[in-house]
């Protein structure tokens, strides 16, 4: 089964195909492949916090202040498992700080 990236799940129209309005998360290549996603697409809540992108709005109902309680974050945790998500988070943070 194909794993959705955040921009596909949220239907925000800010994915990498929308060059004029793409979200910085979609261009975060350091997270490519983590949690089976494209770029930052399945680790968005970590990227938003680590890159200090607190002004990002994923949809009309969701802004970055509620990433921890986001339905998409829970979907990824369920699909990938807590341990795998923790490993992906650690891997990304290690790479992103370089």
Image (spheres, rainbow, N blue to C red):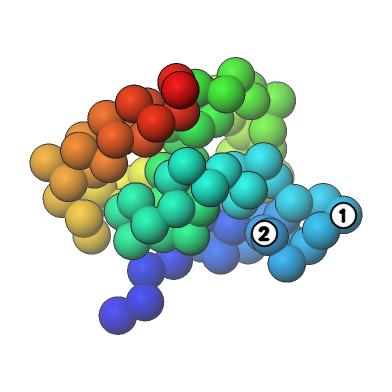
Q: Position of residue 27 (x, y in %)?
A: 63, 48
Mark 1 secondary-structure assignment: loop
Quarter placement of the N terminus: bottom left
Examine the image and state in which quarter residue 43 appears. top left
In the rendered view, does 52 fall on the left or right side of 44?
A: right
Residue 87 image label: none
- In the displayed orientation, state which residue is furthest to the bottom: 1
Residue 20 location (% of width, % of height): 87, 54
Q: CA distance from mark 1 to mark 2?
A: 10 Å
Where is the C terminus found, in terms of image quarters? top left
Along the polypeptide, which appears first: circle 1 or circle 2? 2
Q: Residue at x 51, y 53 (%)?
A: 39
Residue under pointer 2: 15
Pick the residue in front: 94 or 82: 94
Please say whether residue 69 is visible from this viewpoint: no
Is 55 situated left or right of 46 in this image? right
Residue 17 on image: x %, y %: 73, 67
Q: Quadrant of residue 75?
A: bottom left
Q: Which residue ends up furthest to the right in the rendered image?
A: 20
Horizontal placement of 94 versus 54: left or right?
left
Residue 91 can be seen, yes or no:
yes
Judged from this view, the residue extending furthest toward the front is 98
State the residue at coordinates (56%, 43%).
Answer: 28
Number of marks drawn: 2
Which is nearer the eye, 61 or 25?
25
SS of the residue under disc 2 = loop
Q: Which residue is mark 1?
A: 20
Q: Residue at x 75, y 51 (%)?
A: 22
Give how far across and how far down residue 49 sits, in percent: 50, 23
Neighbours of disc 1 within 10 Å: few (<14), some (14-19), many (20+): few
């Amino acid at each position: 089964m194909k794993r959705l990236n955040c921009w596909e799940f949220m239907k925000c129209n800010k994915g990498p195909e929308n060059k004029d309005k793409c979200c910085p998360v979609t261009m975060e290549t350091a997270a490519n492949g983590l949690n089976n996603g494209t770029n930052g697409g399945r680790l968005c809540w970590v990227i938003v916090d680590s890159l200090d992108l607190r002004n990002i709005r994923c949809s009309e109902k969701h802004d970055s202040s509620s990433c921890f309680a986001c339905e998409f974050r829970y979907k990824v945790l369920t699909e990938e498992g807590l341990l795998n998500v923790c490993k992906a988070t650690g891997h990304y943070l290690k790479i992103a700080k370089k």
